[in-house]
Image (cartoon, helix red, strand yellow):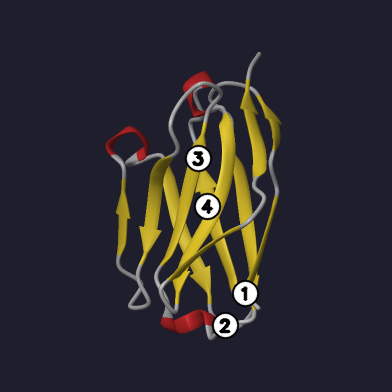
Amino acid sequence: QVRLVESGGGLVQPGGSLRVSCAASGMNFRLFPMDWFRQAPGKQRELVARIESSGITTYTDSVKDRFTISRDNVWNTLHLQMNSLKPEDTALYSCHVKYRERDYWGRGTQVTVSS
């Protein structure tokens, strides 16, 4: 059974930094692309960043040059380092994997950017 558990969210001031993490289990983590999504109140869920099994990364335009996705294939953990945070980055951040044709999500971790 695939399980994804996020951690590391919280309240941060504009311009600050935060790192969120996702611990994965029940799958051969290193073989699969992993995603970070976010959903703000009243908005659709959006793909923030993806990291392929090769390590190649892609980002949505609004976070390029501010966010960095990474993976630790020893500890089966996905990370998202977020710098220069803005109030519009406030959202529930969730990790995602497509495994054997099924989508798996964690419960998410809340990130709030406010002064």
Against 21, residue 102 (above or below) is below
Kindly identify which residue carries mark 3: 38
Label disc, if present, on residue 2 of the rendered structure: 1
| Secondary structure found at label 2 | loop
The amino acid beneath tag 3 is Arg
| Secondary structure found at label 4 | strand
Kindly identify which residue carries mark 2: 27
Near-viewer residue (82 or 24): 24
Tell me which residue sits at (63%, 56%) in the image.
106
Mark-to-mark CA distance, 2 and 4: 20 Å
Against 87, residue 7 (above or below) is below
Kindly identify which residue carries mark 4: 80
Q: Quadrant of the C terminus?
A: top right
Tell me which residue sits at (44%, 58%) in the image.
35
Q: Nearer the viewer, mark 4 or mark 3?
A: 3
Task: Kindly check if marks 2 and 1 are in contact, taking CB atoms under 8 A apart as contact.
Answer: yes
Say whether disc 2 or disc 4 marks the residue closer to the N-terminus.
2
Mark-to-mark CA distance, 3 and 2: 23 Å
The amino acid beneath tag 1 is Val
Say whether disc 2 or disc 1 marks the residue closer to the N-terminus.
1
Say whether disc 1 or disc 3 marks the residue closer to the N-terminus.
1
Against 28, residue 2 (above or below) is above
Q: Residue furthest front?
A: 102
